[in-house]
């Protein structure tokens, strides 16, 4: 599939493009609003061009880059593989995290969004360290167990496992440099680990507490909240 810029500057797409918007979070169509000039492209013959779109859901601007495939007499062919210059933000339920952990982990995800993969790796290690300092003596062992569980579930290759393990838990020597493919594995790994450590734990405790309360209330073993309220008012 291709995109064409015609001699009269008409912009032609063989099919519509929909992406998740980094501004509103909706998956919506990209509507072209700023397209390259045919005359300017023929004059300078760039290998890549920028195209401006707006989100159909929230109307915020979206910026992409496309590769030029061919210069023809009456039209210019572009690749339909549009590379977004602004990546969507990584989403997470931060409200369950302690403030110190939340701050570090937010910055870690921001580094990943900005394609700063080595900074992202460093912030992932700091996330583990900050959490371990607040959770107690066995926290690091717990984090390691969760990492091993992820490795077992997704069946990662040995070199990737060693790299990520050093990134997250290493203490001696320099931090290993990671590439985009390793960062993609790390982002899913750390998000799953943080989810299980904080969010799953909090939700499970809340659900268990609620279940036990209503079960005990149903059997008459505890006094209902309404009864306590009535007694307080009568006193």
Image (cartoon, grey):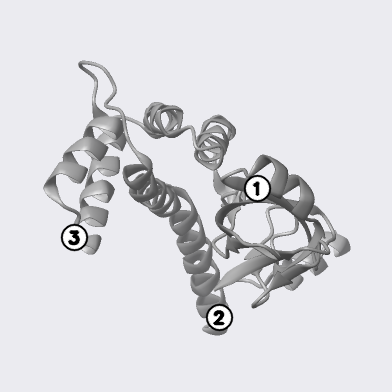
Q: Which mark is residue 223?
A: none
Q: Position of residue 179 (x, y in %)?
A: 34, 38
The answer to whether residue 32 is above or below residue 113 is: below
- Identify the secondary structure beneath mark 3: loop
Residue designated by label 1: 49
Residue tagged by mark 2? 220
Disc 1 secondary structure class: strand
Please report contact status of discs 2 and 1: CB closer than 8 Å, yes or no. no
Q: Could you tell which of marks 1 and 3 lies nearer the N-terminus? A: 1
Viewer-nearest residue: 50 or 126: 50
Nearest the camera: 170 or 46?
46
* Residue 43: quadrant of the picture: top right
Q: Position of residue 118 (x, y in %)?
A: 40, 29
The residue under the point 12% across, 47% down is: 158
Instruction: State the residue lying farthest toward the left.
Output: 158
Are discs 1 and 3 less than 8 Å apart at CB?
no
Q: Could you tell me how many numbered marks the image carries?
A: 3
Q: Residue at x 43, y 34 (%)?
A: 117
The image quadrant that residue 9 belongs to is: bottom right
Between residue 109 and residue 7, name the one nearer to us.
7
- The reply to whether residue 91 is in sight is no
User: Residue 124: image x %, image y %?
Assistant: 41, 34
Q: Is residue 77 left or right of residue 205?
A: right
Residue beneath the point at 37% across and 30% down: 125
Residue at the disc numbered 3: 155
Circle 1 crowding by C-alpha within 10 Å: few under 14, some 14–19, many from 20: some
Which one is closest to the eye, mark 2 or mark 1?
1
């Amino acid at each position: 599939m291709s995109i064409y810029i015609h001699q009269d500057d008409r912009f032609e797409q063989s099919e519509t493009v929909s992406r998740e918007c980094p501004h509103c979070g909706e998956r919506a169509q990209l509507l072209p609003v700023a397209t390259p000039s045919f005359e300017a492209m023929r004059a300078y013959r760039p290998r890549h061009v920028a195209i401006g779109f707006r989100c159909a859901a929230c109307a915020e601007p979206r910026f992409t880059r496309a590769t030029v495939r061919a210069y023809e007499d009456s039209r210019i062919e572009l690749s339909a593989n549009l590379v977004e210059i602004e990546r969507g933000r990584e989403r997470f339920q931060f409200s369950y995290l302690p403030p110190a952990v939340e701050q570090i982990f937010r910055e870690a995800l921001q580094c990943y969004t900005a394609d700063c993969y080595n900074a992202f790796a460093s912030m992932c290690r700091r996330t583990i360290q900050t959490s371990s300092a607040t959770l107690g003596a066995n926290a690091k062992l717990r984090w390691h167990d969760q990492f091993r569980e992820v490795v077992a579930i997704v069946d990662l290759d040995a070199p990737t496992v060693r790299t990520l393990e050093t990134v997250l838990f290493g203490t001696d020597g320099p931090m290993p440099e990671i590439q985009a493919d390793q960062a993609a594995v790390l982002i899913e790994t750390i998000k799953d680990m943080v989810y299980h450590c904080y969010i799953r734990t909090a939700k499970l405790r809340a659900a268990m507490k609620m279940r036990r309360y209503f079960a005990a209330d149903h059997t008459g073993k505890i006094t209902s909240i309404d009864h306590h309220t009535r007694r307080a008012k009568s006193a």
